[in-house]
């Protein structure tokens, strides 16, 4: 078979997407290869297809047990023999898997990086032909990445010790230029093909909201999206427990995940989520890497992550099937303080020397500032993220809350100048809230104790709504006219550019949202995104919605029989295509995207019968 036949037979696709074919051809030509592709772009196919064409074994180094199980389960369901080697296996199971591998039963073996340098695995690796080492989640090798794993540093040592150097391929979805260079250096890739396809996930809708009641906003979102699968990220374990308990009390089918739970409870809760027994997961950032659940329709952040790499990776767990999905961040100023605490604690725990601790702290604080500015900006949210990763294009995507909001340019110079004057008058000693309360003329004990009621700026902006003052304060930080310290207390400071506004006549102009009804904006956003993966503005025809639900029910039934997650049988995208094609025979069913020959033999007739029955019943 060639690469095209494998693509159709096992994976059910007629053509490659994006840069898949370029990366596969590079690997098949024996070249080291680095692919930086967004989540959902089909990275795994780029090493799985060469693995089936190579003579010998492909080792896939993977960071998490859940990721390995998911990938191996998908391959086995497609008719490809694969195995994983990690700590979840008993010693007997581990030895048996190695023996089967020696016999050539597995063209693909997933292995945890911690296993590579063990005597038993080294003995195995020296006795078989290893054609390729594929490094998944390759950003984990970089100390400058957000998911650095020291065990990844052993990969190069392992490769050096092999009798014959295999092809090395590496893949990641999130890598800044510094992380990319680190991957190339640390893995010692030789004259590699490097392909960056771009970071854009056009199917994802982005929004930042600042509700007074964040839990209420989440509850309302779930009420408006019944039956959908999603993830709710919280900053702390305590938040996870509170939100999960409240959602269960309010009747939502949710479960939870954080590092404070037992291994058994984490495993059970994760399986409940994957198998759609509890379609909504409330979790800390300990959850998610390698979760290949394709039908996650939303990711809500109940708090701001500490950097954009983490946010984009977590948000990117939505819409892996390419269908429309929503990523909403509920922001509060307290999030900055919480993340600053995490940054400081992380440095203490790392055992770093003082010089390195200072370097990493400054780097992490700069990342936190850029993450915070994401929550402030009125520009296109997608463009802001892409610029962070080094991609530049139009500042309008049409699929984020900012692009769907009507803005108007407003001169806020007088407000800005008064805020700067207040910071200067108090000799840069107080935080944002004190400054805002002062210019707004608040009569509070704190303002009186600090004697800010005697400031020349006291009450000067009393007629300006407090929310507008906060917007302008955020804009001044975004433009670099003010800075907020990240020491023990968040203090507002002037910058070298403050004088441009204070004394040099620099105007401050910002985009402010026109007052548009929330329902109108929500309706516009929903219409723009379309539904169930159909082109924007289109919807299912007569009977197709009903057919989709019948197909989904059949998929659930088969998944229970085979004890696999529903999306392993067929993705929502494949079911959607079935509704459009309405196949009547084998040939038409094989034309459906995601239906390969192996899966047709397993499931095809049952799905054909379901389609026929629905059509005979008139929908």
Image (cartoon, grey):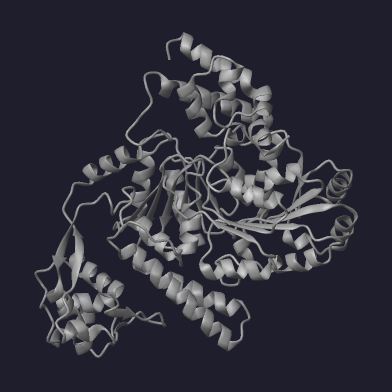
Where is residue 505, by image quadrant? bottom left
Q: Is residue 440 visible?
A: no
Q: Identify whether 115 is placed above or below 605.
A: below
- Quadrant into which the N terminus falls: top right
- Which of these two is toward me, 23 or 327? 23
Where is residue 433, by image quadrant? bottom left
Q: Is residue 125 visible?
A: yes
- Quadrant into which the C terminus falls: top left
Residue 166: where, in percent of width, then height?
Answer: 78, 57
Residue at 60% across, 45% down: 21
- Which of these two is toward me, 488 or 503? 503
- Which of these two is toward me, 250 or 312? 312
Residue 142: where, in percent of width, then height?
Answer: 61, 69
In the figure, is residue 254 to the left or right of 510? right
Tally of numbered tags: 0
Residue 516: where, in percent of width, then height?
Answer: 18, 49
In the figure, is residue 520 to the left or right of 76? left
Residue 601: where, in percent of width, then height?
Answer: 68, 22
- Which of these two is toward me, 119 or 160? 160
Where is residue 209, by image quadrant? bottom left
Farthest residue, direction bottom? 427
Residue at 43% across, 71% down: 368
In the figure, is residue 130 to the left or right of 554? right
């Amino acid at each position: 078979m060639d690469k095209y036949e494998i693509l159709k037979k096992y994976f059910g696709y007629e053509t490659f997407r994006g840069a898949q074919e370029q990366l596969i051809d590079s690997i098949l030509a024996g070249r080291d290869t680095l692919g930086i592709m967004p989540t959902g772009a089909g990275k795994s196919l780029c090493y799985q297809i060469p693995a089936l064409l190579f003579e010998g074994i492909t080792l896939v180094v993977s960071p998490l047990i859940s990721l390995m199980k998911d990938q191996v389960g998908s391959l086995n369901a497609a008719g490809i023999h694969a195995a994983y080697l990690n700590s979840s296996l008993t010693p007997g199971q581990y030895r048996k898997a190695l023996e089967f591998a020696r016999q050539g039963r597995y063209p693909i073996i997933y292995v945890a990086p911690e296993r590579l340098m063990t005597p038993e695995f080294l003995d195995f690796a020296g006795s078989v032909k290893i054609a390729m080492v594929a490094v998944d989640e390759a950003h984990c090798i970089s100390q400058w990445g957000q998911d650095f794993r020291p065990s990844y540093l052993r990969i190069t040592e392992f490769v050096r010790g092999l009798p014959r150097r295999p092809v090395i391929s590496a893949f990641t979805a999130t890598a800044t230029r510094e992380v990319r260079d680190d991957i190339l250096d640390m893995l010692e890739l030789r004259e590699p093909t490097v392909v960056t396809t771009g970071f854009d996930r056009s199917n994802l809708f982005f929004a930042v909201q600042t509700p007074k009641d964040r839990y209420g906003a989440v509850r309302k979102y779930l009420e408006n999206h019944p039956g959908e699968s999603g993830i709710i990220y919280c900053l702390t374990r305590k938040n996870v427990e509170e939100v999960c308990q409240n959602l269960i009390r309010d009747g939502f089918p949710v479960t939870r995940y954080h590092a404070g739970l037992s291994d058994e409870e984490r495993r059970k809760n994760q399986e409940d989520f994957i198998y759609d027994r509890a379609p909504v997961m409330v979790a800390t950032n300990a959850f998610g890497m390698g979760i290949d659940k394709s039908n996650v329709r939303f990711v809500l952040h109940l708090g701001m992550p500490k950097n954009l790499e983490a946010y984009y990776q977590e948000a990117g767990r939505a819409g892996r099937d390419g269908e429309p999905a929503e990523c909403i961040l509920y922001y509060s100023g307290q999030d900055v303080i919480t993340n600053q605490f995490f940054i400081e604690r992380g440095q203490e725990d790392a055992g770093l020397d003082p010089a390195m601790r200072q370097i990493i702290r400054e780097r992490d604080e700069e990342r936190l500032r850029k993450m915070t500015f994401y929550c402030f900006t009125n520009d296109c949210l997608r463009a802001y993220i892409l610029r962070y990763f080094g991609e530049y294009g139009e500042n309008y995507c049409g699929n984020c809350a900012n692009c769907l909001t009507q803005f108007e340019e407003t001169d806020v110079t007088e407000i800005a100048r008064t805020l700067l004057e207040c910071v200067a008058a108090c000799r840069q000693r107080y935080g944002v809230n004190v400054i805002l309360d002062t210019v707004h003329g608040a009569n509070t004990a704190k303002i009186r104790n600090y004697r800010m009621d005697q400031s020349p700026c006291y009450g000067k902006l009393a007629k300006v709504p407090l929310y507008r003052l906060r917007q302008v304060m955020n804009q001044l930080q975004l433009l670099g006219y003010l800075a907020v310290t990240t020491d023990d207390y968040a203090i507002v400071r002037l910058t070298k550019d403050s004088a441009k506004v204070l004394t040099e006549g620099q105007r401050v102009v910002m985009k402010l949202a026109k007052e548009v009804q929330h329902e109108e904006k929500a309706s516009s956003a929903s219409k723009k995104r379309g539904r169930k993966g159909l082109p924007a503005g289109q919807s299912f025809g007569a009977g197709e919605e009903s057919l989709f639900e019948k197909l989904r029910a059949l998929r659930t039934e088969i998944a229970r029989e085979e004890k696999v997650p529903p999306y392993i049988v067929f993705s929502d995208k494949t079911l959607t295509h079935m509704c459009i094609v309405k196949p009547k025979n084998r040939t038409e069913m094989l034309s459906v995207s995601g239906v390969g020959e192996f899966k047709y033999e397993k499931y095809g007739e049952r799905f054909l019968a379901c389609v026929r029955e629905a059509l005979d019943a008139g929908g």
